[in-house]
Amino acid sequence: MNLFEYLQERMSMSHIYQPVMIRTLLRKGGRAHKDEIAQEILSYDRSQIEYYAIRVNNMVGRVLRKNKVVLKEKDDYQLLDFNRYSAEELTELERLCTEKISSFLAKRDSIFEHRNHSRKAISGSIRYDVLKRAKNRCELCGIPAEQRALEVDHIVPKSLGGEDAIHNYQALCYKCNANKGNRDQTDFRAIGKRYELRQENCLFCKQESFSPIAENNLAFAIYDAYPVSEGHCLIIPKRHSKDWFELDQAELNALNDLSQKMRTKLLEKDRSISGFNIGANAGESAGQTIFHTHVHLIPRRDGDVENPRGGVRHSVMGRGFY
């Protein structure tokens, strides 16, 4: 491919990535490591620049000001007594900085190498799935990734038994993630205990009585004992909760995860399925008879009722058609 032709005529762009990568390769003699290319692309990412600019001001800049190493004037930093050092001394000071960086990186890599496998870093593919599910926005404040860098956070902390599973991850912008502890007075130790809550006389709390079709850390799926259609199943949180409105975000994610998996499983098993009703009853007047949250996933097929128009609206008799 002729580069002049590609750059001038054939390149279509939704971002600056292509020309930045090509320019990096040109500057590096035609060959560059992926990390070098990534660093060049990173230099144009405004959300990442903002992320580290805040850390310059609130963390490293504050420490260096306190120790009288730098002076801050508006948005500029200045090394105190910079002019007192000779060219040779400046070179030596730069060498010492490089040595400190190398020493720290070697120590960090050693720690990562020996860390427990249960604390392994979140993979790129999982991060992609979490951000995709969140529509590339913070799930707390809603800001898009283009405006502020997003991080993948454990909803139930690892230290409290939280899973390395997609239903236990959420996308938070770095501000919401950093401020979570300051703004939220929730006792996370209590949250960990909440997920173990069972009620003695509750049918769905007796999980040992069922053979789940599928399950994850916070929920399980079973076939309904009185199905309204073939394949009718229930998605049930393991913690005892009265109805849908008592669920935590991690449980909502877990239920959604199992609903998607059961939908796929049912479609693979029965090609006659052409639709689904999904819903939960909340309260006796809404028809709830077992007061442990459960979601109905009901397969539908063409012609299974004379007129399906209205769907779940038929939960109020005579009001389904419109």
Image (spheres, grey):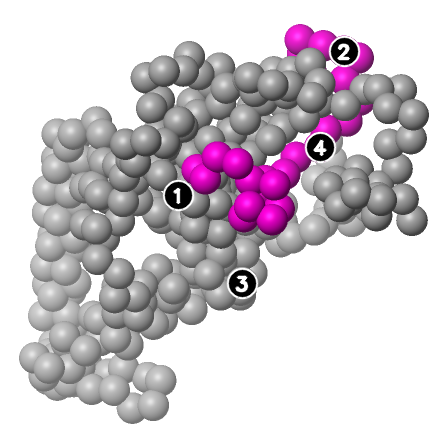
Per the image, the residue denoted by label 1 is 241
**Which tag, 2 or 1, sits closer to the chain's start?**
1
Q: Residue at x 34, y 37 (%)?
A: 239
What whole-number distance in Å separates the C-alpha atoms at marks 3 and 4? Answer: 29 Å
Per the image, the residue denoted by label 4 is 277
SS class, disc 2 = loop
User: Which amino acid is tagged 3?
Assistant: Gly
Image x and y of residue 57, in percent: 28, 76
Q: Can the viewer see residue 137 in this picture?
A: yes
Mark 2 or 4: in front is 4
Classify the position of the N terminus by image quarter: top right
Circle 2/circle 4 CB separation < 8 Å: no
Mark 2 or 1: in front is 1
**Which tag, 1 or 4, sits closer to the chain's start?**
1
Q: For this rendering, which residue is in front, 79 or 258?
A: 258
Per the image, the residue denoted by label 2 is 271
Image x and y of residue 21, in percent: 55, 45
SS class, disc 4 = strand
Is residue 289 shown in magenta? yes
Magenta stretch bounds: 266-292
Per the image, the residue denoted by label 3 is 142
Q: Residue at x 63, y 28 (%)?
A: 297
- Up the image or down, 34 lies above or below 216; here it is below
Q: For this rendering, which residue is in front, 135 or 90?
A: 135
